[in-house]
Amino acid sequence: MTPSQTTALIGSLLLLVGAGFAATGPDWLGTAQGLLAEVGKRYGPEARGRVDAWLGLISQHRGKTEPEQIALVNDFFNRLEFVGDDEHWGQADYWATPVETLATNGGDCEDFSIAKYFTLRSLGVPEERLRLVYVKAVKLDQAHMVLTYTATPGAVPWVLDNLDKAIKPATQRTDLQPVYSFNVQGLWLAKERVGGSERIGLWRGLLARMGVLPGEPR
């Protein structure tokens, strides 16, 4: 199986759950077993174990409340090792799929945020409640990415982060200065929607590799 086929398999698995398929049904099980077999073959048994634990999280916690799901997912991915793209992927910037992050046992802030986003979507959290947010980490004086969750329109978002692992309302994260946010539905500068998320090349490339493109059924 080629890397592109593996990535498509990941996308198919996430789409199955996002579309409402039971995480114990034959479609889910067949796709999950295929993915585990490929991960084990390519990355080894420990990587397969991490991906299996991730699939277990999805299959076991779809009935939980959204605050419970958010806490579980945030904690799950924050256990991984932080590794910069230059060291990890041999390139200046690369946005990994959740399985790539888990299989290689690490990633950077973008990888963690993306993995949390797709996992929460697979658990049934609505798209409009989740945004990937580019911020400036004031204390580090560098760009950073977090995931936010907004329970209801107009509510204060909650921040899922790998720097401060405690989930906090955005009003308490004065160490972060938002620059722009996005999801599959669009791209926002501050609070104003400024266009489609396809304007972000790395994001669009990741969605294309996973078979999830803006405007297509999910």
Image (cartoon, grey):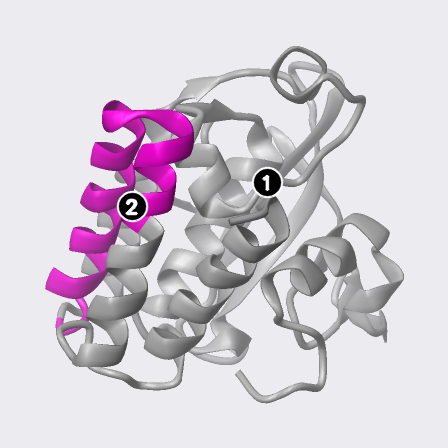
Residue 5 is one of the magenta-drawn residues: no
x 46%, y 67%: residue: 150
Q: Is residue 169 above or below residue 192?
A: above
Residue receiving disc 2: 37
Tag 1's secondary structure? Answer: loop
Q: Main secondary structure of the magenta part?
A: helix
Disc 2: CA contacts within 10 A as few (<14), some (14-19) or many (>=20): few
Q: Position of residue 138 (x, y in %)?
A: 69, 23
Residue 172: x percent and y percent?
47, 40
Question: Residue at coordinates 43% horizontally, 49% vertically from top-left?
Answer: 116
Tell me which amino acid carries mark 2.
Ala
Determine the secondary structure under disc 2.
helix
Q: Quadrant of residue 182?
A: bottom right
Task: Tell me where residue 135 appears, x and y as whole percent.
Answer: 70, 39
Residue 173 visible somewhere in the drawing:
no
Q: Which mark is residue 96?
A: 1
User: What residue is drawn where x is 35% and y is 34%?
Assistant: 41
Residue interval drawn in magenta = 36-63
210 left or right of 106 in image: right
- Work out which residue is located at the far front of the displayed protein and give it: 1
Q: Nearer the viewer, mark 1 or mark 2?
A: 2
Q: Which mark is residue 192?
A: none
Which residue: 37% across, 44% down? 38
Residue 44, quarter of the rendered image: top left
Q: Is residue 51 magenta?
A: yes
**In x, y percent, where is residue 165?**
36, 30
Q: Does residue 161 sit above or below 137 in this rendering?
A: below
